Amino acid sequence: MRVLLINPYSGGYYYRLGAVYPPLGLMYISSFLKRKGHSVTLIDMNVEKFDLERFNFRDYDVVGISTDTVRFPVVERIAEKAKAQNVTVVMGGPHATAYYNEILRRGLCDYVVLGEGEKAFSDLVESISSNEKYPLIPGVAYMKDGEVVALPSRFLENLDDLPFPDREKVHLYRTKFAGERATSLITSRGCPFNCEFCSASQFMGRRIRWRSIENVMDELKILKKKGYGSVVFFDDNFTINPKRVVNLCEEMLSEDLRFKWWAFSRADELLGREDMVEAMSEAGCRMLFIGFESASDEVLEEYGKNLKSDIAFDVMKLLKKYKIDVFASFVIGALKDTRKTIEKTVKFAKKLKASIVQFSILTPYPGTVLFEKLKHLIVEKDWRKFDGTHLVFKHPNFSPRELRRLFMKAYYAVYTSPKLMFKRGIPFLVRLLSHREAYSL
């Protein structure tokens, strides 16, 4: 079968700041399909030209499109064009998984793949090639006789069984980290936490599944041969298993795999594990992304973070000792947030003196606990506004305009501090404020 996989144009926060990483999910699916003998073309609209109006979808038997919430309007247009040329269209990704019922009833696509896509999508392609229109495949949904048929998805148990991501087009990506050419990989799937605003545990499951250290090392060796000097570990929670992290770092050192890298972590997983932090630093860790979220413990409780704000400074002190920078993330606009608590959070963020600070406006994404909690209050119908920079629901304390002003003031307050102004604040603010379509007041 001839399969086309499309990663839609993002235009989101990281894209605007120049951090564009390859779509690992589609790359895994591509490799999986190629191993089954199918012909696969993967197009990433973020790094290559794609003329939707003139594109000939008839060259393919199946078109698979990945979508999160903010990109869904783009995906709708792609799907419409493909279906108009009588091509079978499949959607997948977090938004499609959460909204499959509405998507199918609107006739936007023929099938939706729920959750992890490798096996479900591959089995679906096999069924389509056999002219089986209504296959009973776990993780595949479709319309039949006016009703939606959906079998629950199944998570892959042994991630080592997956082929490495298809990196045929890696030359198109120009992202750098710490001065080195950078790419991404993932060593685990799943997250045991259930933060209200995050869909990771719903999409990938709350039970963590790990690749073996040997399997990860084999991929890192390939990346080194391809000329990469930097990687980002896109695990939802890289540091949740300290012993495994230490083992991986020791293997990287013993194999002389010198990368500068960063990963996602939680503040409470670092305290009391100085051995892990030291091992990460020695193995090339230069930054950790940590969601501190708020200076208010009451707000943290609302978010379901299950941690206290006051540990942040101890975490910063520990990481500074081992020369690991911090990408500190904060979310404003909790139901319990007031102007006073947001101002407290901004002052807190400045005092932390993290290398990079990110603020987002609380956004109820489909598939999250927060969405179910707030769906009766959602007033914004344009999915493009679900980008973390707009208030999309009726808030008890703020209007959309007022919260946007506080959002911009937060960035201005932090990035005009002496430390960040000279380190990276001025270029950050220039790029941020130049995108008026996303950040206009």
Image (cartoon, rainbow, N blue to C red):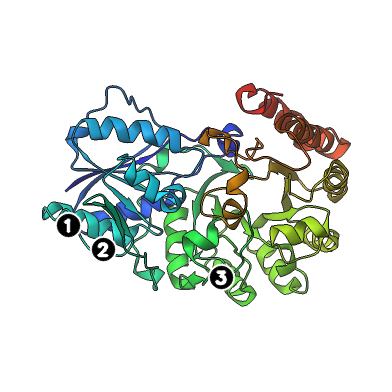
View extreme (left): residue: 130
Question: Pointer 2 and pointer 1: residues touching (CB < 8 Å)?
Answer: yes
Please give the label number shown on residue 248: 3
Locate residue 328 relative to residue 172 in the image: left or right.
right
What element does badge 1 sit on?
helix
What element does badge 2 sit on?
loop
Q: Amino acid at mark 1?
A: Ser
In the rendered image, residue 289, in percent from the top left (x then y), is placed at 67, 53
The C terminus: image quadrant = top right
In the picture of the structure, the residue carrying the numbered disc 2 is: 137
Residue toward you, 46 or 195: 195
In the picture of the structure, the residue carrying the numbered disc 1 is: 127
Residue at 45%, 72% (x, y): give it: 214
Q: Amino acid at mark 2?
A: Ile
First in sequence: mark 2 or mark 1?
A: 1
Q: Amino acid at mark 3?
A: Leu
Res 425 visible? yes
Locate residue 338 relative to residue 123 in the image: left or right.
right
Question: Pointer 3 and pointer 2: residues touching (CB < 8 Å)?
Answer: no
Tell me how far mark 2 sits from mark 1, CA to CA.
9 Å
Residue at 62%, 38% (x, y): give it: 392
Residue at 76%, 65% (x, y): give it: 307
Q: Quadrant of residue 269?
A: bottom right
Residue toward you, 400 or 260: 400
